[in-house]
Image (spheres, rainbow, N blue to C red):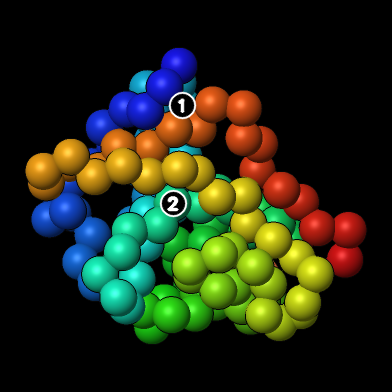
Amino acid sequence: MAFEKICTLDDVWEGDMDVFTTSCGVDVLILGVENGEIRAFQAMCPHQAIELVDGEFDGKILTCKAHLWQFDSNTGKGLNPKGCQLAQYPVKIDGEDIHVNVEGIEPLKSDC
Ligand code: FES
């Protein structure tokens, strides 16, 4: 499989996030980050598999609602606690369409 269209730029404004599902059933969290870029990550928190879309996003930092773990929205790296990480999917923008490629990328889980 390769890149596939998952949504459009109109679906995720800057400072906004939503979950979309690929044709093979992978849920992808799409973030409109502060500098106008689009990022795509695993939809579930690596801590205890809570939906990240139910948390908070301020355009820079994504915060899980369950235990307030925080992630950098550009890299998916854990800010609090450090050492955790979200799996990130490559994104391509084609006109208004957002394409992602989930091939070979598994959601990460934390040992914490
Ligand atoms: S489930 Fe996300 S911080 Fe615990």
Q: Residue sitting at 76 percent across and 79 percent down? A: 81
Location of residue 79 with respect to 49 vertically, above or below = below
Front residue of 105/56: it is 105
* Residue 100 position by quadrant: top left
Does residue 9 appear left or right of residue 41 in this picture? left
Label count reads 2
Question: In this orientation, does residue 89 appear?
Answer: yes
Looking at numbered disc 2 in the image, what kind of residue is underneath it? Ala
Label 1, on which residue? 25
Rendered view: 64 above or below 43: below
User: Is the residue marked by circle 1 packed among few (<14), some (14-19), or many (20+) residues within 10 Å?
Assistant: few
Counting from the top left corner in percent of width and height, residue 27 is at 47, 40
Q: Earlier in the sequence, mark 1 or mark 2?
A: 1
- Describe the element under mark 2 as helix, strand or loop: strand
Does 22 sit left or right of 48 as displayed?
left
The disc label shown at residue 45, or none: none
Side (left or right) of 110 relative to 33: right
Q: Amino acid at mark 1?
A: Gly
Q: Position of residue 25 (x, y in %)?
A: 46, 26
Q: Nearer the viewer, mark 1 or mark 2?
A: 2
Between the C-alphas of marks 1 and 2, the distance is 15 Å
Mark 1 within 8 Å of ligand 1, using the beta carbon: no
Quick check: which quadrant has ligand 1? bottom right
Q: Which residue is mark 2?
A: 40
| Residue 63: % across, % down | 54, 77
Name the one closer to the observer, 100 or 18: 100
Q: Which residue corresponds to the image point at 76% horizontal and 51% vertical from the top-left?
A: 109
Q: What residue is shown at x 88% (from left), y 66% (from top)?
A: 112
| Mark 1, secondary structure of its residue | loop
In the image, what residue occupies the spot 53% across and 57% down?
A: 51
Res. 66 visible in picture: no
